Image (cartoon, helix red, strand yellow):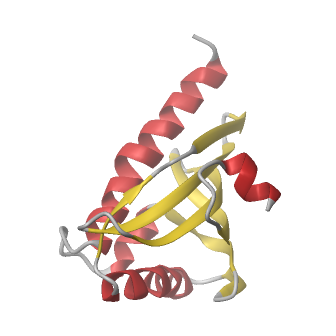
Amino acid sequence: MSQQQIIKDELSKWFFEVYFNHWVEVASGVRKEGPDFILKYWGTPMYACAPPRLRAWLTTDADVVKFLEMNHIPLKEQGYTHTVIPDRKIIVYNEHGGAIEVIWSRRRADDSEIERAAVHFEVARLDREWKVVGVQVKLTREDTLDKAWAE
């Protein structure tokens, strides 16, 4: 197995099995944790662009936590329970950097969709741990990343 494939598998496990599940469990209320859990996965500083809500450098841990809350609060108010992932992609730049792209279909218990977004995460290995260091969000109705980015 190539070094690139090893890193890709590591990123996939970290992002989709650890981070994603933790995020969903907190957002859906399954896990009773405060929003500061996100600091385990998101770095500071972090650039976040999620129009029309935010386009800024998050330079403190408090800014990063506030960004998470900005995402969680409206989902919780609309009965969020889970996320379906219609498409995903992992790009390995090198042993310390990569990108993960996904389409999040955020849903209620009856499987009705609250929101669908194409999201690009820049990730970096910092102190032997992966962290999100940048995020770009685009609301979409598409099922594939290629179509979502081409809109």
Task: Please give the name of the residue rendered at 34% of the width and 84% of the height, measured from the top-left corner.
Answer: 78
In this view, the residue in front, 106 or 135, is 106
In this view, the residue in front, 138 or 59, is 138
Question: Residue 44's image quarter?
Answer: bottom right
In this view, the residue in front, 46 or 54, is 54
Which quadrant: the C terminus?
Answer: bottom right
Task: Please give the name of the residue rendered at 28% of the width and 80% of the height, measured from the top-left corner.
Answer: 79
Q: Is residue 7 above or below residue 113?
A: above
Indicate the position of residue 29 as horizontal and vertical percent values. Answer: 21, 74
Indicate the position of residue 127 as horizontal and vertical percent values. Answer: 54, 50
Indicate the position of residue 39 as horizontal and vertical percent values. Answer: 45, 70
Horizontal relation, residue 135 to residue 116: left or right: right
Q: Is residue 122 above or below residue 98?
A: below
Indicate the position of residue 21 as horizontal and vertical percent values. Answer: 33, 54
Task: Please give the name of the residue rendered at 42% of the width and 67% of the height, measured from the top-left corner.
Answer: 106
Q: Is residue 42 above or below residue 48?
A: above
In this view, the residue in front, 12 or 125, is 12
Given the current orientation, which residue lies at the most extreme top position?
Answer: 1
Task: Please give the name of the residue rendered at 36% of the width and 64% of the height, measured from the top-left corner.
Answer: 23
